[in-house]
Amino acid sequence: MTHADTFEGGIFDVDGVLVDSPHEKAWRESLRELMQPEWRDIRDRTGWTPEALTSRVYQEELSGKPRLSGAQAALAYFDIPDDEEGTRAAEYADRKQAMVVRLIEAGDFTPFPDALRFIIAVKDAGIRTATASSSTNTKLILRRIRLDTFASEHHISSPSVRPGLTLLDFIDADVSGRDLAYGKPHPQIFLTAAHELQVKPENSFVVEDAAAGIEAAKASGMSAIGVARADDADLLARANADIVVTTLDDVDVAALADGRLATRHG
């Protein structure tokens, strides 16, 4: 896709894009905890098994959604009954949140090196950056990632990286975990990010690993880069990502100055 002007804003999802975070693990293990001792009286009437919440199910049903919506989607997918008040969904969402905080505080997450290289290159190209995730745990993760250490270890010389800089300090805006009226695939979170960056949606691109996020980006009038880290390039392509890559090292950063999304080899 080509724009009349250059890109002015780059908006990044966090889990699965910038960081291999423990959200998927927390969704899987917290449901396992609930189904085996506490909800075992209904277990045989559901489609759940200990191996059933696969990475594919996570990407298609839960990834990118606000916590309660994700819990509701998982219960519906596995035919786990809930009451009118949504008690089970709320209990699952709370259990997952407590677990993911414990995992993050224990350091159970890994930044993707290609994503850190890319976001530094984007900032060095004069493009403002934001993070936009449904997770309320984003700041907890981003403030633990030292970009100055990463740049030094990977021999990256960047005018945007100064001593002591964390990834949270590096970005220009973070709209993650906001109490918004709508979650992805609604475009509200990305439109909010563009507003806070003071850039037009049509002059912005989004980096996402989930189909719901790509759909939200396109609904906002933004361009979209799909990052297929879970063998799900077909899902991202069907959601109408402008380009799909397996590593952000393959994105042509120079093309961004012309308002284009392109791969280095395509």
Image: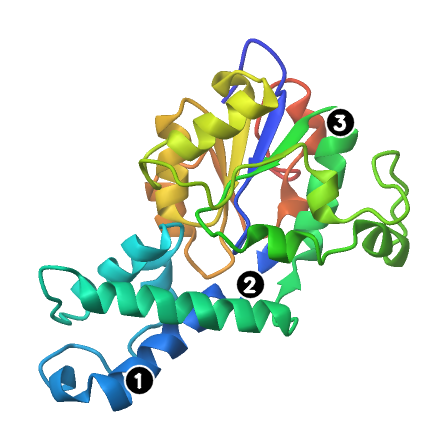
- Residue 257: give x, y in percent of width and height: 69, 20
Query: Which one is earlier in the sequence, the residue at label 1 or at label 3?
Result: 1
Lateral position of residue 185 relative to residue 11, left or right: left
Q: Verify CB contact (< 8 Å) between mark 2 and mark 1.
A: no
Task: Give the residue drawn at x 83%, y 35%.
Answer: 160
The residue identified by callout 3 is: 125
Question: Marks 2 and 3, Cα distance to the nearest angstrom?
Answer: 27 Å
Marks 2 and 3: which is nearer the front? 2
Marks 1 and 3: which is nearer the front? 1
Task: Give the residue drawn at x 61%, y 21%.
Answer: 7
- Residue nearest the observer in this picture, 240 or 109: 109
Query: What secondary structure is marked by label 3?
Result: loop
Q: Which amino acid does label 1 sit on?
A: Pro
Camera sees residue 155: yes
Q: Which amino acid does label 3 sit on?
A: Ala
Figure label count:
3
Query: Which one is earlier in the sequence, the residue at label 2 or at label 1?
Result: 2
The crowding category of the residue bearing disc 2, from other C-alpha atoms within 10 Å (few below 14, some 14 to 19, many at least 20), is many
Q: Quadrant of residue 12?
A: top right
- Residue nearest the observer in this picture, 71 or 20: 71
Query: What secondary structure is marked by label 2?
Result: loop
Can you tell which mark lies on residue 50? 1
The residue identified by callout 2 is: 21
